Amino acid sequence: MIPDRVDITWIMLIGLALATLLIPPLVTRPLLGNALLLTFAGIKGRRLVLDFLDLRAAPPLWRGLLSAWVFIVVLFAWLASVIVALV
């Protein structure tokens, strides 16, 4: 039996959630750790938007807008962590 896309996304989300637990003890540089964690969050957010909100079949404009929204949220979170680290 071949798993469908939602099952693969679900397994990927669990794997990335577990990876977020393992990153902080392994990475000693805070900005690198934040970048990795936020990258994982961005990947999870995009997979949720595409697969669980079923936007893979949506027009490219909607996919692009929601993917950009996820990217912008992650970017602002990373910029905030950089500002806090520098202050």
Image (cartoon, rainbow, N blue to C red):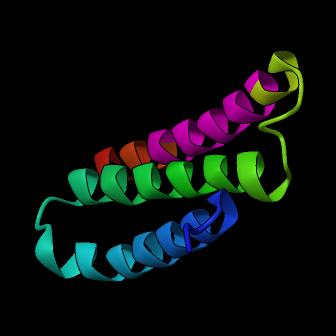
From this view, report whether residue 1 is shown above or below residue 71: below
What range of the chain is rendered magenta? 64-79
Q: Is residue 17 above or below residue 75?
A: below
Question: Residue 7, image x and y in percent?
Answer: 62, 71
| Nearest to the observer: residue 70 or residue 64 | 64
- Residue sitting nearer the eye, 77 or 43: 43
Q: Please say whether residue 76 is one of the residues in the magenta stretch.
A: yes
* Residue at position x 58%, y 39% in the image: 76
Name the residue nearer the viewer: 43 or 50.
Answer: 50
Q: Is residue 19 above or below residue 66?
A: below
Q: Quadrant of residue 66?
A: top right
In the image, is 65 to the left or to the right of 76? right
Between 23 and 50, the residue placed more toward the observer is 50
Percent position of residue 62, x then y: 87, 26
On the image, the x and y values in percent for residue 10 come to: 60, 72
Look at 58% across and 68% down and name the residue there. Answer: 3
Percent position of residue 28, x then y: 11, 67
